[in-house]
Image (cartoon, coloured by chain):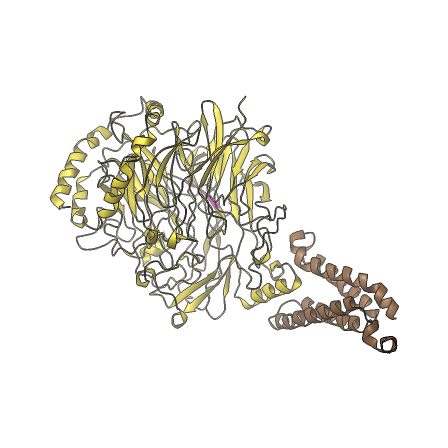
Chain colours: A brown, B yellow
Amino acid sequence: MTTTEASSPPASRNIGVLILGWICVLFGLVILAGGIWLIALGGSWYYALAAIGLLATGLMLNRHRIEAVWIYLLTWVGTLAWAWWEVGADWWAQVPRLVAPTVILVLILICIPALKKRA
Amino acid sequence: MSPILFRLALTATLAAPLPLLAQETTPDSDAPPQQQDEAPAGADPETTAAPQSDAGEAATAEPADTADSEPVASVVEPSQTRVAAEQRQVGVDWPFYGGDAQATRYSPLDQITPENVSQLEEVFTYHTGDLPEGTAEGKYSPETTPLKVGDDLLMCSAMNILISVDAATGEENWRFDPGVPNDAIPYGASCRGVAIYTAPDMADDAPCATRVIQGTLDAKLVAVDVATGAPCEDFGENGTVDLWQDIGARVPGWYAVTAPPAVVRGVVVTGAQVKDGQAEDAPSGVVRGYDAITGELAWAWDLAAPEANRDGPPEGEVYTRGTPNMWTAATADEELGHVYLPLGNSSVDYYGSNRSEAENEFATSLVALDATTGEEVWHFQTVRRDVWDYDLGSQATLLDWQGTPAILLPSKQGDIYILDRETGEPLTPVGELTDLPTGDIEPDYISTTQPISEWHTLRKPPLEPKDAWGFTPIDQLWCRIQFHRANYQGFFTPPSSERPWIQYPGYNGGSDWGSVAVDTERGIIIANYNDIPNYNRLVPRDEVTSQPIHKQESGGDSGTNAEGAADPQEGAPYGISVNAGWRSSLTDMPCSAPPYGGIRAIDLETGETLWDRPLGTARRNGPFGIPSMLPFDIGTPNNGGSVVTASGLVFIAAATDNLFRAIDIETGETLWSTVLPAGGQANPITYEVDGRQYVMVTAMGHHFMETPVGDEVIAWALPEE
């Protein structure tokens, strides 16, 4: 048992990080598809771009790479800037723009110790 | 009943009241309301319960048999004899649907103040007992506002049960059930209110000297004695006038009265709701005046044949079909002898090329008629060639505006107009939108210009892609995709079929039937409003699956959907699909950002906004229909108006959070609120009994507003010393 545990990669992976990673991949794919549709309709490019960031974050999380944190931070700061540019201090309008992305940010920050251990 | 008998009854009833009507009633103007106080006290709830069932049978047992009597109506020549009578005053009483005769919804009472309003306590809850059963399930929207006259609250229930309740205790005095069947429910079971009329020359203790009059869902005018609830035998057939007369084939639910009648100089004026979107060949929108004592037709105003059909259509014919109707409350002008009719649109709302010139001329107009003759005095159109269901829903308010007798008209587009009520000329600036898009469906029909109020509008700027909303980026993105898929060119975007179109504001307003309150002392208009788009599509005929109401089997599920959700519009090349409130197919939440409704104070002098706040908290709303319990003022959709008191308070329920609240008129701050047991989609009232001021609202729910159904009539007052 101990030998297999040491040599098998999954054993050292944090299950929470993996779940978060797959959530980011899933949401990233959904938003990417919708975002491309929106671009095709002449709408905002934000969603597709943010989806790429989210997708990349998810893939990095699945590999337990600390880069996931940096990629997501970039995505989140970009989201913040875009959201402020679009609707400013209209807080009801900020709900869809900032609440869920910030929840994911917090979850990713919680993952940092696990990612560092792996690194 | 035979025509001969009818003639006999008519001459008998005409002989007495008409000459007497000519008498000047002003000298003893205060007398009727005072004597009024005595009458209801004599009402005995035990003994008066009896007549209801008999009369109910009588009312339902005498359909379509008076067709021959129509020509007789021309015998009535009221124009020379009908004079103005002194009107009851608001204050101790709430004698009109709109509070006073001017429909200002302003009360001079001032016992409840901004300082003490937080001490309000419930005095009584009265249950009408009228709750939906069977096929009425999911169709209740009572919207009921009682009158308070003397010691009594006088009201109708959703299914038109007339009820008198002691205004201080909530004990029932009497009730009269006209026996309205479920299949009479048009879109929703609503009875917004009743009217009261005191015959100027009947002995005070004569039966029906003062009478309560309502229009019913099964299209009857019903008059009962204010003290006993017994039907007025002199009025129509045993207290009932059949409004289906000369309308055409009886299709229950297609033609229904939901608003209180207006009584002007002894003439009871009523229109009816013609269920929207069924067919171009629909019941007429004719507005009719009836003698308040005899119930005899005084005149008819058929906008497509005003002269020819004034005394009713020729033998064997009906009033012009499919014309714009008046489903909301008219305003009586006793002084000028006018009645002001906020007209809706033609029966088929979203397609216009088949409409007549008369329909185009009058649809969505405020029309002033001489209430003694039924002749048009003027009309003011708020939408040209309306293909958006922008019916005028608000009762107009009479006021003196900078020295001119005026009328204030709010519209569903949110525009507020003030007109000279003698001429219809605008007293405030009216602008014109030009070069409006005409679309692909009927480009020659759609108007390229539209009037707007440059004095004040409740309307917000056009939607932008960034206004798409949701709780997460995913559902916001979905709504944003829907925005770009739709055809939207701003205000008055014409209907389209290949792609959906966004209509903003939607048909709920702006201002709807709750109308506005006008504090004439402070010079402030209080207007609550909706701020919601609709997401619509014209459905090509071969894709239309719904049947018009006259081809449905009875007890169909019409009414459980939002108005226009899937209407056939028979006769037009398209049916209509309306997504009211542009709800997301993912979450059922609106696709547009909050607030969805607000309340605003407007300076009556300048038209400037004094304050503007979201109305309604998020406590009952949330994604997937789950209440969020959030106490934030998100601003919910709302239906129902407000009351303003001399002490500077605004009382309003209306919002979908089921709260009833008192707002400081100076600041817009909510000073007091209480949770209602059901939706408060009704106009509140205030009144006084024995020196104690009460505020009252009915909590009965609303199917379209998705608030819980109830049967409560609730009164609050300050604690007694």
Give yes or no for residue B419 being in the magenta stretch: yes
Residue sitting at x 13%, y 45%: B3
For the N terminus of chain A, give its image quadrant: bottom right
Which quarter of the figure is the C terminus of chain A placed in?
bottom right
- Closest to the observer, A101 or B432: A101
Residue B374 visible, this orientation: no
For image coordinates 18% across by 55% down, the residue present is: B316
Q: Is residue A87 left or right of residue B393?
A: right
Residue B298: image x %, image y %? 24, 41
By secondary structure, the bulk of the magenta-drawn segment is best described as strand
Q: Identify the residue at horizontal 84%, vertical 72% (top origin).
A: A12
Q: Is residue B106 above or below residue B489?
A: above
Q: Which corner quadrant of the image does residue B177 belong to?
A: top left
Task: Indicate whether residue B422 is drawn in magenta.
Answer: no
- Residue B86: % across, % down: 34, 28
Q: Nearer the viewer, residue B40 or B137?
A: B137
Q: Quadrant of residue B230?
A: top left
Q: Residue furthest left?
A: B4
Tell me where residue B98 sits by quadrant. top left
Looking at the image, residue B43 sits to the left or right of residue B487; the answer is: left
Relative to B714, say whether B363 is above or below: below
Q: B222 or B568, which lies in front?
A: B222
- x and y, in percent, of residue A32 in the image: 67, 71
Q: Where is residue B635 shown, x and y percent of the image?
A: 58, 48
**Vertical arrangement, residue B191 with respect to residue A83, above or below:** above
Residue interval drawn in magenta: B416-420
